[in-house]
Image (cartoon, rainbow, N blue to C red):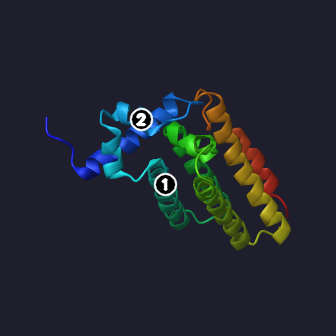
């Protein structure tokens, strides 16, 4: 069996890390346990990554690319504020649902004990999502919606996303972040878009 190329091995390491984040909830993942799972030595891991921080950084970049590339498409495809926001919310919740290990990054518990820079980096992803939601609301120019209520609405939507992801992680990935979403979206839509 041929040895994987450098890029393939990096991908294998990251995929194994994501799988371990899903399977080993509540336990720390060391480079030694990761190397064992990948089937290589720790030295081999360090040939592809400078350390665990770089591995997590690569996963965060993946999250950003996956989410924000699709957000750009949603903004082009959808013309109304409520449709744009609904699609972005579904995108983030669906992404978490399909990627349980990565949802631990989104929720932040996988980064406990890691460098503050990684936690800040993940917080920036959430901030970008909230900023995008706020921008959509502001551009919509909904009658009766003030700057203050735009900010409050974006924060509410962001808190709902984070809450769904946290519940998914807390449930050991048994309670989908999409569970009950349609009813909840109707309630959010009524609250946010009937301000006039």
* Towards the viewer: 89 or 165: 165
On the image, the x and y values in percent for residue 106 come to 59, 47
On the image, the x and y values in percent for residue 34 come to 41, 36
On the image, the x and y values in percent for residue 43 come to 32, 43
- Left/right placement of residue 152 relative to residue 32 reads right
Q: Could you tell me which residue is drawn at 63 percent across and 53 percent down?
A: 86
The answer for how far apart the CA atoms under marks 2 and 1 are is 19 Å
Quadrant of residue 40 within the rendered picture: top left
- Left/right placement of residue 12 relative to residue 180 reads left
Q: Could you tell me which residue is drawn at 58 percent across and 41 percent down?
A: 110
Q: Which mark is residue 32?
A: 2
Comes first in the chain, label 2 or label 1:
2
The crowding category of the residue bearing disc 1, from other C-alpha atoms within 10 Å (few below 14, some 14 to 19, many at least 20), is some
Mark yes or no: residue 144 visible: no
Secondary structure under the numbered disc 2 in the rendered image: helix
Q: Nearer the viewer, mark 2 or mark 1?
A: 2
Quadrant of residue 79 within the rendered picture: bottom right
Check the picture and name the quadrant holding the C terminus: bottom right
Check the picture and name the quadrant holding the N terminus: top left
Q: Could you tell me which residue is drawn at 39 percent across and 41 percent down?
A: 15
- Left/right placement of residue 34 relative to residue 3 reads right
On the image, the x and y values in percent for residue 65 come to 46, 59
Q: Which residue corresponds to mark 1?
A: 57
- Left/right placement of residue 156 relative to residue 73 reads right
């Amino acid at each position: 069996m041929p040895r994987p190329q450098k890029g393939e091995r990096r991908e294998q390491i990251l995929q194994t890390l994501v799988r371990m984040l899903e399977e080993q909830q509540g336990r720390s993942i060391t480079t030694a346990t990761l190397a064992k799972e990948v089937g290589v030595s720790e030295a081999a891991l360090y040939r592809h990554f400078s350390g665990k921080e770089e591995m997590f950084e690569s996963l965060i970049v993946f999250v950003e690319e996956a989410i924000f590339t699709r957000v750009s498409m949603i903004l082009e495809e959808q013309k109304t504020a409520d449709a744009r926001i609904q699609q972005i919310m579904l995108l983030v919740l669906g992404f978490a649902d399909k990627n349980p290990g990565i949802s631990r990054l989104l929720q932040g518990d996988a980064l406990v004990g890691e460098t503050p820079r990684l936690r800040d980096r993940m917080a920036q992803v959430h901030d970008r999502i909230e900023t995008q939601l706020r921008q959509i609301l502001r551009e919509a120019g909904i009658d009766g919606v003030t700057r203050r209520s735009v900010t409050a609405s974006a924060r509410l939507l962001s808190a709902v996303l984070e809450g769904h992801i946290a519940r998914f992680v807390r449930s050991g990935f048994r309670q989908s972040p999409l569970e009950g979403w349609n009813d909840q979206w109707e309630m959010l839509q009524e609250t946010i878009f009937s301000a006039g």
